[in-house]
Amino acid sequence: MENEEIALILEDAEERMQKSIDFLKLEMDSIRTGRANPSMLDSMKIEAYGTQMPINQLATISVPEPRMLVIQPFDKGMLPTLEKELQKSDLGLTPNNDGSVIRLSIPQMTQERRQEMIKRLKRLQEDAHVSIRNVRRDALENLRSLEKNKEISQDDLRREQDSLQKITDAHITRADDEASRKESELIEV
């Protein structure tokens, strides 16, 4: 009974920490490097048909060349809306609407823009660390309440705290690895 509860607490913590890593990856994909990548538009939501929709549900996004994205809406009436939202976004890209598709030229990144992107990356990395530590705190509270209710011994609590810390350390390391991979992409000219 008690081992099952402990296992559930640790399993839940690990799942939630993994979600933090997944969210970090998703957010990092939206950080612009020098190359065109359709995932850099994933975080954009467009007001369409009375609801907020991801851009990839409204258009086909292709990469015809390394520094160009082509957005072809399924509904041509969405072109002006897409163009306006792309101009308002924090991507720093100027959309070129030719009446049937929108072209986004990805300019060579300046050193200043690269530094801005690295700062944004560091903020995302720190947010992931905080999220993972919050999950650890919640799991610790659950373990301590088991010990307080005499469902597990102090030795069990200490042992499980060590297990939880190992899980936490592993996820923080993974977050750091993902961030350093993205940083090396940003530094690459």
Image (cartoon, helix red, strand yellow):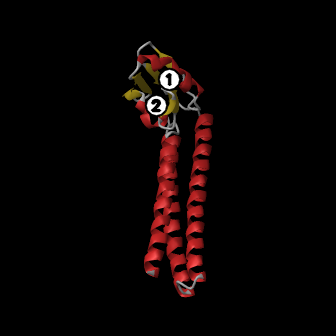
> Number of callouts in the render?
2
Q: Tell me if 4 is positioned left or right of 183 in this view.
A: left
* Circle on res. 139: none
Mark earlier in primary sequence (1, 2): 2
Assign a secondary structure to mark 1.
Answer: helix
Q: Quadrant of residue 1?
A: bottom left
Instruction: Identify which residue, 1 or 172, lies in the foreground.
Output: 1
Look at mark 1 in the image and give the residue it sits on: 82
On screen, residue 126 above or below 48: below
Q: Gap in Å between the C-alphas at discs 1 and 2?
A: 8 Å
Identity of the residue drawn at 48% across and 70% down: 10
Amino acid at pointer 2: Ile
Q: Tell me if 62 is positioned left or right of 163 in this view.
A: left
Question: Pointer 1: residues within 10 angstroms few (<14), some, or many (20+)?
Answer: many
Residue 12 placed where, x, y %? 47, 65
Identity of the residue drawn at 42% across and 32% down: 56
On screen, residue 18 above or below 58: below
Assign a secondary structure to mark 2.
Answer: helix
On screen, residue 148 above or below 80: below
Amino acid at pointer 1: Leu
Please say if the residues under marks 1 and 2 sit with CB atoms less than 8 Å apart: yes
Residue 61 placed where, x, y %? 40, 29
Residue 116 placed where, x, y %? 62, 39
Q: Is residue 181 visible?
A: no
Q: Is residue 121 visible?
A: yes
Look at mark 2 in the image and give the residue it sits on: 55
Instruction: Identify which residue, 11 or 122, lies in the foreground.
Output: 11
Q: Quadrant of residue 102?
A: top left
Identity of the residue drawn at 56% across and 55% down: 128
Residue 52 placed where, x, y %? 51, 33
Question: Pointer 2: residues within 10 angstroms few (<14), some, or many (20+)?
Answer: many
